[in-house]
Structures are given as C-alpha cells and as structure tokens.
Amino acid sequence: MLRKLSGIRYVAIRSHLYAVFLTTVLVLSGLLIIHVLFSPDWLTLTGIVAFMLFYILFGLAIAFYIGFQSGGDIKERLDDLSVLITQFANGRYDARTDLDERDEISRISNEMNELGEKLQAQVKSLKRMADEKADYAKSAHKAAAMEERQRLARDLHDAVSQQLFALTMMSEAAVKQLDKQPAVARSQIGEVAAIASKAQTEMRALLLHLRPVHLSGDPLPAGVRKLINELEQKTQLNFSVEMDDALTLSETVEEHLFRIIQEAFSNTLRHAEATSVKLAITLHANELFLHIRDDGRGFKAEDDINRKTSYGLKTMKERTDELGGTFTVRSSEGEGTYIDIRIPC
C-alpha cells in the first residue's frame, strides 16, 4: 500500500494538494487583513468562512483530478521507457519508443533509442568478428594440417621410401648371389636386415607423429606414461621417468608439454640410435622444469640447428616460446642429447 502511494500519480496529486493548501492560506490571510483594516460591509466573517470552505472543497476536487490525469500521463511515458529497457535487457536491440513531447522524458527516450542502435550495431560487429575468427581458425587448421601432411610426405619419401627401394635392390642382388657367392649373399642379407630394422624404426617415429596431439582428457603424467608404455612395447628403448603423478597444470601447458615430449621421443627414435631415454618433470619455486636425455650418437648442435633434421627441435622451441619459457639443447657427437626446458607457472 505504501509503495502504491509513492507512485508517480500520487506524487502529482500531493503536489497539487500542496499548491491548494498554499493558495488557501494566502487567500485567507488576504481576506482577514482586508476585514481587520477596512471592515467593508460586504466582507463578514461568515462570508469569509463560507467562501473558504467552498474554495477548499473545489480546490481539493480540482487537485485530485488534475494530479491524477497529469501523473497518469507521466506514468505511461515512464512505463514505455521501462518496457524499452526490459527489451534491451532481453536482447531485443531493435526495439524503439516514440515520444513527441519536447521535454526531459522525450530527451531520455531519444537517447535510449540511440543506445539501442549502438547496441544493435555492436552485436552485428561481434557476430561478424566471431564469424571471421571461425573462418581464420578453419583456415589455420587446414594450413597446419596441409603443412604436416607435406612434411610427413617428405619424410616418407626421403627416409622410408629410399630405404624400401634399397631393400628391394639388395634383396634382388642377394637372391642372384645366393648360389654363386653365398658369403656375399649372406652379407647382403645382413645389410637388408639392418635397413629393414631402420625402416621399421622410422615408420614407428612417423606413426608417433600421427598420434593425437592432445591428451584426450587425461592429465599430463597419465598421458606421458601411456605414451612410454606403448613405446616400450614396440621399441628397444629403455625409459627412466621422474615425474609427480599428482602434478596439476593448465590445459594449455599440458597440451604443449605433451607435444614437446612426443616430438623429442620421435627425434630419438629416428636419429639418435639410442638405447635409453631419461625424462624428468619437476616443479620448483613456481617454475616447471622438463629434462629429456638420451644416450644416442648425438650431433653438432651449432651445425645442425638450421638443417632439416632440426625441424623437431624448432617445433619444440616454438611451443616453449608460446608458454613463455626457455629452451636449451646440448649435444655432441657420441655423447647423446640433452634437452632442458624451463616454464614459469
């Protein structure tokens, strides 16, 4: 009830009643002053009382009627603005209101219409940006997939294809020498076995690249251990792992680290001729340390850094840079390869 009495109509009625009260006081004061000072015959106390009662009743009726009507008009205009704001809140930015009066409420109405136009334009702009972003993402994904396919095709051609060709030629030569020169044939068959083993290792490394580059919902320690278990079953590598299974990192960091480890293992399979690999992931003083070492044949890092064989190292460095970390690789011929990565957490 109190909230209803505080509405705009009742505010207008109260303002008109206040005006009636003030005019009543002024009129009554004027009549009394004339009566006291001049005492005219036509102005008596009875006449003053009767006139004031009639004036008060008539003024109250007029105040209620005019206040109710004028307050109702203002209320309707404010209700239109309230409905417009509600439509904006519900996402209907094309809604508009039309007020012809030239006052403050009409000015607010025009400003609300302009606000609706701006919001509508911003929504269109955001949708356009979202569509463009989706198109860019699709284009980037297609380009990345195309680049990866081209790289794998080059690797297959440069490594596995040539090794299979060599296997074919050497096996044919061994068959021809089998009756005439058994010793030569035996030696060639041994070379065929070595090349076949190398081709098999190369294919395993390429298949490792074709694995999903994400963890499929697993945390990083679980995903790394699954990868190592699979490699131990299919290769002769011995793995030594130092890692906290309760390690928790952000999804982006885990995805990048998993891909870095996957790339490092692939390089070891293809180039290192190693027998053992050590992996250590530790967290100290808000920094994550990743250490990967193999006992392979190594290489001259300063000579190979710009060659095709260092493609994997470049990829690992780029992923490390995206995480704001530092990437260090140390290697020398006959002493294996050491990869150290430090990432702030």
Image (cartoon, grey):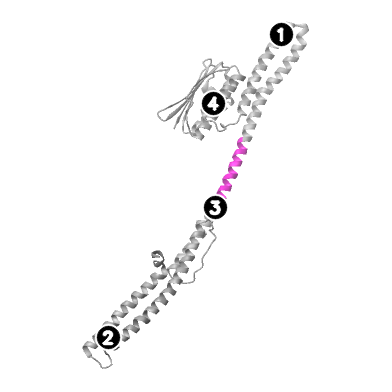
Mark 1 or 3: in front is 3
Q: Amino acid at mark 4?
A: Val
Q: Are marks 2 and 4 in contact (CB under 8 Å)?
A: no
Residue 257 on image: x %, y %: 52, 29
Q: Of the residues tagged 2 and 1, which is closer to the observer? A: 2
Q: CA distance from mark 2 to mark 1?
A: 141 Å
* 134 falls in the magenta region: yes
Mark 1 vs mark 4: in front: 4
Q: Which residues are magenta?
A: 126-144
The quarter of the displayed image where residue 148 is located? top right
From the top left corner, tell me how far across and down residue 264 is, in percent: 55, 24
Q: Residues within 10 Å of mark 3 (few under 14, many from 20)?
A: few
Rounded to the nearest angstrom, the CA distance separating label 1 from label 3 is: 74 Å
Task: Work out whether mark 2 precedes mark 3 in sequence or the reverse, and give the earlier one.
Answer: 2
Q: Kindly tell me whether residue 313 is visible in this rendering.
A: no
Residue at image position (59%, 22%) is 230
Query: Could you tell me which quadrant the C terminus lies in?
Result: top left
Is label 4 in contact with label 3 (beta carbons under 8 Å)?
A: no
**Badge 2 is on which residue?**
31
Q: Which mark is residue 125?
A: 3
State the residue position of label 4: 224
Q: Nearer the viewer, residue 266 or 154?
A: 266
Q: How many marks?
A: 4
